Image (spheres, helix red, strand yellow):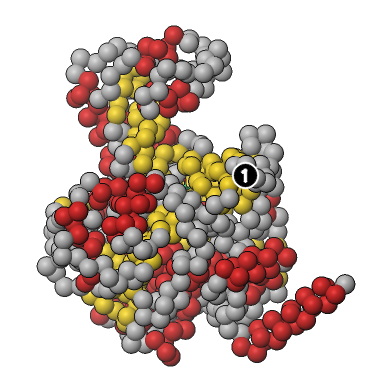
Amino acid sequence: MWSRYLFGVVDFFVKLRDNRTHMPFFEAEIKTWEDYLRAYERSERSNAEFWAAVADTFHWYERWHTVVEGDFARGEARWFSGARTNLCYNGLDRHLPDLAQKPALIWEPNDPQDASVTLTYEQLYQQVCRFSRVLDQLGVKKGDRVCLYMPMIPEAVVAMLACARIGAVHTVVFGGFSTAALADRINDAQCKLLITADGAFRGDKIVPLKFMADRAFFDCLSVEATVVVRRTGEEVNLAANEYWWHEEMEKQTPERPAEILDAEDPLFILYTSGSTGKPKGVLHTVGGYMTYVGYTFRNVFQPKKDDVFWCTADVGWITGHSYAVYGPLLNGATTLIFEGVPHWPDGGRLWDVCDKHKVNIFYTAPTAIRSLMTFGDKQFENKSLATLRTLGSVGEPINVEAWEWYHQKVGGGKLPITDTWWQTETGGIMIAPIAGITPAVPTYATFPLPGIFPVLLDGAGKEQKYEGPTVYGNLCISKPWPGLARTTYGDHKRFVETYFSTYPGYYFTGDGCFRDEHGYRITGRVDDVVNVSGHRIGTAEVENAINEHPTALESAVVGFPHEVKGQGVHAFVLVVETPEHPEKLADEIRAEVVKNIGSFAKPERITFVQGLPKTRSGKIMRRILRKIAAGQTDDFGDVSTLLDPAVVHDIAGLKYY
Ligand code: WTA
């Protein structure tokens, strides 16, 4: 009774404070361990109230009438119904009164000899307005899909924000994807406009983006116009409906009001791989994504007023969307984007960039760390790294050695690693230490952010509650949160089947996970997705590409442990007879994968087999192939359901190419 009364009093003051200032308060600003616990407890008590308080830290033209509605268990939770807002407005216009002259975007080019570029909030705003007008001029309307196939240059950020400004839906395709993969995505999303560049510099190479896009067009009838950024100087012939970025920008004025959008209007589609079939277009919406990404950025990374934040991810991946672009800008922070690669011109490139731009918060993937570990200490010669305060990791499990190296060599033994677990579908970081506030433990993503409710379920759907000894299970989320994707574009059934059918009532992440006193430790995918250098690759996609080769009757692809990439791709290819020139055939098969997906998905190892371990019902028993690929051939477990158990030992004895 008394405690109820006390809560009532506290709530009254909290509400009073909300009404008075409409400014961030503890849900949105976690500054101490107590704040964290209090915010978590409050989110447990009332999820809707909690998220409303977080959402209140943004600008809404009209506030919501309902915070969350719809059935989460059926993938139908919808957020901030009735509310109207604009993410671009929140990321730019809202900051102009105070931050017009503050750097919003720092761009470091591929070649260290070239000049970097800094755009203030005002300059970025003006460019975004101009490009919004270019989009208007080209007939792009609210809801139209726009494909970006671009290098890491400021124009990519400008184009994303301009789409957000006018309500067009961007779909960014990573520049490492092949022509065929680009065409698939453009067709699936029925993009009306393509924005690309003559080429992309990547270390000492040039990727001819426009040339690749031209070839995609034979199959892409939806594209009505193309805008091309001049970057590398590759020769480009512009057709009638193709325009140079710089020429179109010059014609426009630097003002263009932000479109007033519904909270549930689509913001972007991003293609990602799953267990089966083609990549799916994960769709995020304006209000929920904005709220979640803004909230997670400021709490997980704890940016200070003049910090420079550097997320090394390409904008072609979700990490680039959420933490190179939207998260920092929503918080009025300075974000750095880098066009180049970590190893060129030498292994110290990333550290030079940190020193040159006085980076305070650095966020990268374990694969980058592991590959830099092979360069030795020379990479740190003449580097200070003195401005770094927070180090983050994302994309795959970080092993102890990589964690320690990152902590010791980059963090001078002082900076812990903020290991952030999340996914394209979750919109933003879900489980992670709060930098400098909650403990960081090697290999652990530790604890969920307030508002996020993970559970571990076993194969039968039974909750594995942590009550002392370590538990293990499949990681699921039990309550809705605003950042969750709303659907897979054009196929809601697939969305429900993929994420909400394995465990009724829960969002299923596809990851396995331990839970002990340090929190959650994610072990990696439990489905047929391979994570190579932090890139999600669906084994079915690689198999389809391999099967395009006339000699491949069938194939089965699995991941194997790889020292640098985390996992590598191992393909078992069924052929009628042992090839005469296996190396040559292996190269041809790799070329099919490069052509259909991109070189990052290339199988590192190919074994030619005359039989695959299939069950009597015709399913490939991948568990066995995974063991063979990992070199664990002493015990295959129960193989009694196999059609031909002898095949296992035949394969185990074969060489790979
Ligand atoms: C994996 C990237 C362990 C995981 C943001 C997940 C991680 C998939 C971590 C999503 C981490 C991501 N520790 N594993 N800190 N972060 N993963 O959609 O398997 O490209 O399901 O999103 O990456 O990859 P995606």
Compared with 299, 445 (above or below) is above
Q: Disc 1 designates what residue?
A: 456
Count the labels in the image.
Answer: 1
Which x, y percent locates residue 354? 26, 67
Which residue is most to the right? 1
Front one among 27 and 116: 27
Residue at figure coordinates x 27%, y 13% from the top left: 578
Which x, y percent locates residue 459? 63, 34
Query: Dot 1, crowdedness within 10 Å: few (<14), some or many (≥20)?
Result: many
Front one among 351 and 527: 351
Residue at figure coordinates x 51%, y 75% from the top left: 86
Q: Is ligand 1 closer than 8 angstroms to the Cβ of mark 1?
A: no
Which residue is most to the left? 113
For the question of whether residue 7 can be seen, the reply is yes
Q: Quadrant of residue 55?
A: bottom right
Q: Quadrant of the N terminus?
A: bottom right
Horizontal side of 150 relative to 526 (left or right) equals left
SS category of the residue bearing label 1: strand
Residue at figure coordinates x 40%, y 31% from the top left: 558
Compared with 533, 122 (above or below) is below
Q: Quadrant of residue 498?
A: top right
Residue at figure coordinates x 30%, y 26% from the top left: 606
Front one among 381 and 326: 381
Q: Amino acid at mark 1?
A: Leu
Q: Quadrant of the C terminus?
A: top left
Which x, y percent locates residue 119? 29, 79
Horizontal side of 340 relative to 620 (left or right) equals left
Horizontal side of 45 relative to 526 (left or right) equals right
Front one among 563 and 185: 563
For the question of whether residue 319 can be seen, the reply is no
